[in-house]
Amino acid sequence: MSELPTELDPLATEVADPGRRLIDAVGARYGDGAYAEEIRAAREQFDALRGRVFDDDAIYLQHMALFLEWYVLERALNSEGRPPLHVALCAGAIASEDRPLAEALARSHRSAFEVVRNGDEGLRLYDLIGDSFWYVPLKQAIVGVVRGEIVEARLYVWEGSVRLGPHVFYHPRTAHDMIHQIVRQRAAAGTLDSGLVFELAGMRLRHSRFRNIAIDRIYRDG
């Protein structure tokens, strides 16, 4: 989409979301002490999936926030066979007033989305991997995001409407057509799955480090 403005190419944003407090609390509970080795192994796994990030990388803080979110909601503990949030729910370690939110987060969906509309009626997203549309009400619409933006985000249903998770991760606007090409190629080959989210994140990391390399040499399949 050549009309996408590129003079302001955002990296990431934080969203006002009630799930963040719960993710932080569960991460603290299962992030040290007896789980120190577990979280070390999880960090290595996450870095292998998305690319290793260092503290001087522009993307470092976002990478670590997404790691905690992934660790709490998606990555099965070696000792339990389930992610920390699921373990906490089964163990009765979530306060009763937080259980509905915790259960909603446990069913959350992370993918690569294209912004179809961001206006007075809210945010409309298209799931590039799941081939589905999602509507996020105006109260969580993101300022400055334009039609055609491709983002990595987490969605979940809470209090009767779709909510954005606490962190939204942007891909370069100039990578729009290349990402679509990758999606089309994999869909045609029958290999399109959620693993593409991690691969695209690795491409984003390489682009942030090597701005002198043409973006179509970074955002490519294979």
Image (tube, rainbow, N blue to C red):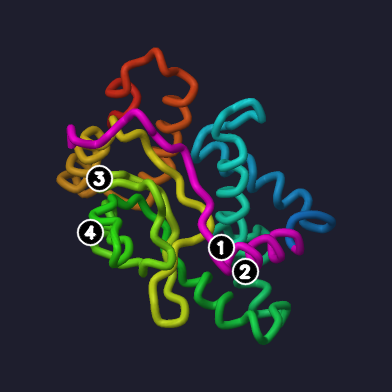
Given the image, on which type of amino acid does mark 1 rest?
A: Leu
Q: Residue at x 32, y 23 (%)?
A: 215
4 lies above or below 34: above
Cβ–Cβ below 8 Å for labels 3 and 2? no
Q: Please give the range of residues in magenta.
A: 1-29
Cβ–Cβ below 8 Å for labels 1 and 4? no
Provide the residue designation for mark 1: 73
Instruction: Answer with mark 1 or mark 4, whichever residue precedes in sequence.
Output: 1
Residue 110 rendering spot, x and y as whole percentages: 42, 58
**Numbered mark located on residue 148 in the image:** 3
Instruction: Name the image quarter holding the N terminus.
Output: top left
Given the image, on which type of amino acid does mark 3 rest?
A: Gly
**Numbered mark located on residue 85 in the image:** 2
Residue 166 rendering spot, x and y as whole percentages: 53, 58
Label 1 neighbour load within 10 Å: few <14, some 14-19, many 20+: many
Label 3 neighbour load within 10 Å: few <14, some 14-19, many 20+: many
Q: Tell which residue pokes out farthest to the bottom in this image.
A: 96
Residue 23 sits in which quadrant? bottom right
Tell me if residue 222 can be seen. no
Provide the residue designation for mark 4: 131
- Secondary structure category for the residue under label 4: loop
162 lies above or below 160: above
